[in-house]
Image: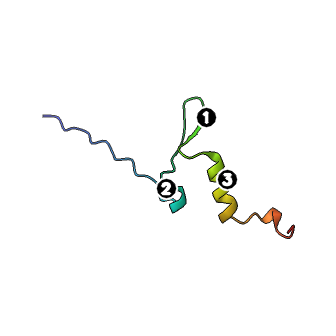
């Protein structure tokens, strides 16, 4: 009897709690698919990341 190949379970990457459920992939046409709207991602980055190009402009 042949052994069945087990398909590995897809583990979700660890993400910040505000981005829970975030998944990103590239389809066969080279388009980026994401599970969270880009505006929500940009809002998160603006809140949590320091942009060194904008330092001193405040």
Residue where numbered disc 3 is placed: 42
- For label 3, the crowd category at 10 Å Cα-Cα, with few meaning under 14, some 14 to 19 and many 20 or more, is few
Q: Position of residue 57 (x, y in %)?
A: 87, 67
Disc on the earlier residue, 3 or 2: 2
Number of numbered discs: 3
- Give the residue drawn at x 75%, y 63%: 51
**The residue tagged with tag 2: helix, strand or loop?**
loop
Image position of 4 (left or right of 37): left
Q: Is residue 6 above or below residue 43?
A: above
Image position of 9 (left or right of 27): left
Residue 29 occupies quadrant: top right
- Give the residue drawn at x 39%, y 47%: 10
* Cα–Cα span, label 3 and label 2: 15 Å
Disc on the earlier residue, 1 or 3: 1
Q: Position of residue 19 (x, y in %)?
A: 54, 56
List the single residue furthest toward the top. 29
* Cα–Cα span, label 1 and label 3: 18 Å
Residue where numbered disc 1 is placed: 31
Disc on the earlier residue, 2 or 1: 2
- Give the residue drawn at x 51%, y 59%: 15
**Which numbered mark, 2 or 1, is in the foreground of this view?**
2
Q: Which color scheme did the rendering employ for the protein?
A: rainbow
Image position of 26 (left or right of 56): left
Residue where numbered disc 2 is placed: 20
**The residue tagged with tag 1: helix, strand or loop?**
loop
Q: Is residue 41 above or below residue 55?
A: above
Residue 56 occupies quadrant: bottom right
The label number, if any, that marks residue 50 in the structure image: none
- Give the residue drawn at x 62%, y 51%: 40
The C terminus lies in quadrant: bottom right
The N terminus lies in quadrant: top left
Q: Is residue 9 above or below residue 3?
A: below
């Amino acid at each position: 009897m042949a052994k069945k190949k087990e398909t590995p379970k897809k583990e979700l990457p660890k993400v910040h709690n505000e981005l829970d459920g975030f998944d990103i992939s590239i389809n066969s046409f080279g388009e980026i698919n994401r599970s969270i709207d880009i505006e929500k991602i940009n809002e998160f980055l603006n809140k949590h990341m320091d942009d060194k190009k904008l330092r001193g402009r405040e």
